[in-house]
Amino acid sequence: MCGIVGYIGDNNALDIGIKGLRRLEYRGYDSAGLAIHNGNSVDCIKSVGKVDDLAQKIKDKDLKGNSIILHSRWATHGGVVEKNAHPHTDCKGNIFIVHNGIVENYKEIRAKLTSLGHKFVSETDSEVISHLIEHFYEGNLEEAVIKALKYIKGTYGLVVMSKDNPDRIVAARMFSPLVISVNEHGGFVASDPSAIISHSKRMIFLEDGEVAVIKKDDFIITDLESRVKDKQETELDWDIEEAQKGGYPHFMIKEIMEQSESVANSMRGRLIIEEGISKLGGIDSVKDKLKEIKKINILACGTSYYAGLIGEYLMEELAGIPTEVDFASEFRYRKFPTVADEAYLFISQSGETADSLAALKEIKKREALALGIVNVVGASIARETDAGVYNHAGPEIGVASTKAFTSQVVVLALMALFLGRQRNLSLADGKNIANDIAKLPILIQETLKNIKDIELLAKKYSGASNFLFVGRKYSYPVAMEGALKLKEISYIHSEGYSSGEMKHGPIALIDENFPTFAICPKDSVYEKTLSNIQEIKARNGKVIAITTMGNEEIKSLVDDVIYIPEVNEVLSPILSVIPVQVFAYYMAVSFGYNPDMPRNLAKSVTVE
């Protein structure tokens, strides 16, 4: 969950590196550091805190060089102190490394190297890599890196620089993403495309077990046996402006406001309304297999898991396929039977979630059908699954997911429509669903017109220490997502529950100081949810209701109302989640917190 940038070329390496690292700061911001090579020697500078702290530390230093490696850290091994920041070096100050991932056998390696005379200065697992490379180094950097990697157990996105090899940077990947680009501007490497996309849209994504030697005008990629790999470039359709705030105070609110556009992009070219079907090119290669599947297993983590729960309702209601949703982090440790006519669907914004990737690798061992819904083009899950669908939501920088969630639900609806029309979903029903999906961008714009009213509600309830979110059926996952958003960025204790479960325990918490968000559009379970709201009000609980425009009866029952446009029940979460996103954002802002960088969290969880 850390950021890596590397550059070698004739341009200003320091400027390129710092700008790239700023774009990755959402991935790690406990500390930051750089190593810059001036052709003769290497300067290594580290700082606790954000990239701004590092920039402040180097502003009066004359740091010139043709190559640089940088890192922003999110601590896993060792405290947040300068000695634990990256880059790490060896005993001789020749090898410099930045590393994402975990070295599982670092204690054994450290003990062995210590017995051979190596001196360690940090508490991190990463430092053993620089010393292990030093141990094997005999003048050829890439050979030493490959020899060292064969001893390492665990995960790595690794970039290495050597004082003795000023003309190259070596990068290697195992289970932690790295992307490279070599063009007229020089050679680049990063843990995320957004760091270097201003210099090139054409990139090469390293696979597990691959090593890249990057020069200013050339590169070569091999495996760990030094066999040369033929790699194809991927052209990304992102613009650097997409990764900027665009006049908004935070990325999170910008991305909330972008949801009309991101949802439109997710469905663009994928609906054939007159035929009541969706066209998903990414799964076309397995459409015959999909027609025969008897069950879908959805695997995800965090917000993507809640999108998966909505997907469960969609798959069962529209396609008639039994569906089960699991946390990928739990699924990977279960003993589970693999059945030939089941499909496994992995949902991940980044496509690099460690637990999801581990579960995917287990599924692949069993030769089961693996599908993906991923936002980042070229990400590991997208490459490792048999087929899948890209979100096309654009880069999501805010740590708390917003537009990726609504995009995921739209893609799940498109997939459920596709599978339903393969089976028993009628043409008339298919056309109705397709029509309703097509209207979503306009309906989202209508929903966002309430933003100022929701800001006022956040101020009204900013004194609350606890919140309850409740909903039924399609609104139940929204309740859990609303609770997650509030705790993620406002640090307020919040719980998400099925409304029907209130009487089985949670209602004991309700009093005048414990407000409830009730997700209750005018759907098939509206009356049931209304009854649960009455139970809360009978205990003097305050209630904020999210309901459908035109619903006047609820005003007399609850304390506050947020209206969303009328929409087909199966698509209601795409609208009802937006007010809880906005509410969480303004709650965080009211406390002076930065919602883009919530404490203890990072955007992409690439370690277990």
Image (cartoon, rainbow, N blue to C red):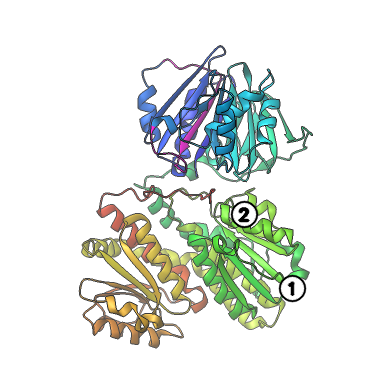
Disc assigned to residue 357: 2
Residue 342 in magenta stretch? no
Q: Which residues are magenta?
A: 62-81
Percent across and percent down for residue 325 are: 57, 70
Q: Residue furthest top?
A: 40
Amino acid type assigned to the residue bearing label 2 in the image:
Leu
Residue 47 seen from this side: yes
Q: Report whether 247 appears left or right of 152.
A: left
- Can you tell which mark lies on residue 341? 1
Q: In this orientation, which residue lies closer to the viewer: 424 or 541?
A: 541
| In the displayed structure image, the side of residue 549 where residue 15 appears, left or right | right
Label whose residue precedes the other's in the sequence (1 or 2) = 1
Task: Check disc 1 and report its element: helix, strand or loop.
Answer: loop
Q: Quadrant of residue 95?
A: top right
Q: Is residue 37 above or below residue 159?
A: above
Name the spot of residue 203 as percent of width and height, x first: 65, 38
Q: Tell me the residue at 64%/39% (across/down).
A: 173
Nearer-the-camera pick, 177 or 401: 177
Amino acid under label 1?
Answer: Asp
Residue 527 quadrant: bottom left
Q: Residue at 61% of width from left, 66% of height from top?
A: 334
Q: In the picture shown, does residue 239 fall above or below 313? A: above
